[in-house]
Image (cartoon, rainbow, N blue to C red):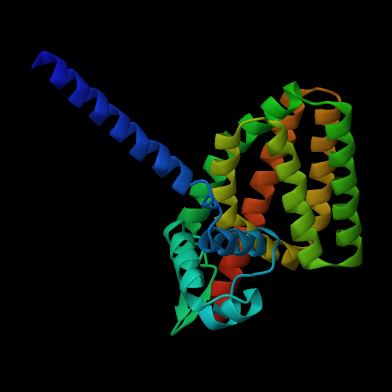
């Protein structure tokens, strides 16, 4: 009796193992799912457009126009826009039109304080991890920013300004810190279009050059001071432009 039970269990084990092996064989030809879904790709492209200065305050876009430009269906575009609206990077302008929100004085002041704390931390870490290759990349972007300002190229300047700052922030070596700063810049970067109104791009480039030289020389305190000056002066000009626009609208 005992012997027959052992035979039964042995047979059951072999049968179970056979099913498992068959299952493994069955899935050998299945292609693994890609991590980057269409929605993720559309979301990243919209983020790039915002961060590269392609969408300015007051400009509007539609789901249909984005879908056509990216050659995708409206569904992933709507989902990506919903994510960006939750972050405060986009808002409904009117009807079906979407654009970057106009920031109020309180929002600008909050962004100024948060940027001053978080971005200066990234700069300090970047100074510690600097190397000749990083310094060369940063100087190249600085030249591009100075050339864009001299040529009066607004979008090119905003794009180069983004590249300059994020070349520094990536050098900090913290993906989490970089993600936090990226979310902040989705809200503040479009507002840099307003800096041209007061000719601030030239002033900004002087601050960027001081920031570059401090990083190159390994002077963390001077780099932090230069970045804070850049953040604070941009805030003052954007706030002044906001007040002027409100006065013009009556």
Q: From where the camera sits, is residue 200 visible?
A: no
Residue 31 shown left or right of residue 168 in the figure: left
Report the label total: 0
- Residue 3, above or below 50: above
Residue 86 shown left or right of residue 248 in the figure: left
Residue 47 shown left or right of residue 137 in the figure: left
> Where the N terminus falls, by quadrant?
top left
- Residue 191 % position (x, y): 62, 62
- Quarter residue 145 falls in: bottom right
Q: Name the one closer to the observer, 183 or 199.
A: 183
Q: Name the one closer to the observer, 11 or 19.
A: 11
- Residue 241 % position (x, y): 63, 65
Q: Name the one closer to the observer, 145 or 116.
A: 145
- Residue 230, above or below 56: above
Residue at 72%, 29% (x, y): give it. Answer: 126
- Residue 219, above or below 81: above
In the displayed image of the protein, which residue is found farthest to the left?
A: 1
- Quarter residue 173 falls in: top right
Residue 81 shown left or right of residue 134 in the figure: left
In the displayed image of the protein, which residue is found farthest to the top?
A: 2
- Residue 25 % position (x, y): 47, 43
Residue at 84%, 46% (x, y): give it. Answer: 206
Q: Name the one closer to the observer, 42 or 32.
A: 32
Residue at 74%, 37% (x, y): give it. Answer: 168
- Residue 103 % position (x, y): 51, 62
Q: From where the camera sits, is residue 15 visible?
A: yes
- Quarter residue 167 falls in: top right
Residue at 55%, 75% (x, y): give it. Answer: 247
């Amino acid at each position: 009796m005992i012997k027959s039970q052992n035979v039964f269990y042995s047979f059951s084990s072999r049968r179970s193992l056979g099913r498992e092996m068959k299952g493994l064989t069955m899935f050998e030809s299945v292609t693994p799912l890609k991590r980057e879904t269409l929605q993720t790709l559309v979301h990243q492209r919209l983020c790039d457009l915002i961060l590269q200065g392609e969408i300015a305050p007051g400009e509007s876009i539609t789901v249909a126009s984005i879908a056509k430009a990216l050659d995708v269906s409206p569904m992933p575009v709507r989902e990506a826009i919903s994510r960006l609206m939750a972050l405060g990077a986009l808002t409904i302008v009117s009807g079906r039109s979407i654009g970057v929100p106009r920031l109020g004085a309180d929002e600008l002041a909050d962004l100024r304080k948060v940027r001053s704390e978080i971005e200066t931390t990234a700069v300090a870490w970047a100074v510690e991890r600097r190397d000749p290759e990083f310094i060369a990349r940063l100087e190249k972007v600085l030249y591009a920013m100075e050339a864009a300002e001299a040529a009066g190229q607004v979008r090119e300047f905003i794009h180069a300004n983004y590249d300059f700052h994020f070349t520094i922030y990536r050098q900090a070596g913290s993906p989490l810190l970089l993600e936090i700063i990226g979310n902040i810049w989705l809200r503040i970067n479009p507002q840099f279009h307003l800096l041209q109104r007061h000719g601030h791009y030239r002033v900004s480039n002087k601050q960027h050059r001081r920031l570059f030289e401090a990083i190159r020389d390994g002077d963390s305190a001077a780099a932090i001071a230069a970045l804070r000056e850049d953040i604070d002066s941009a805030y003052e000009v954007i706030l002044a432009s906001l007040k002027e626009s409100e006065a013009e609208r009556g």
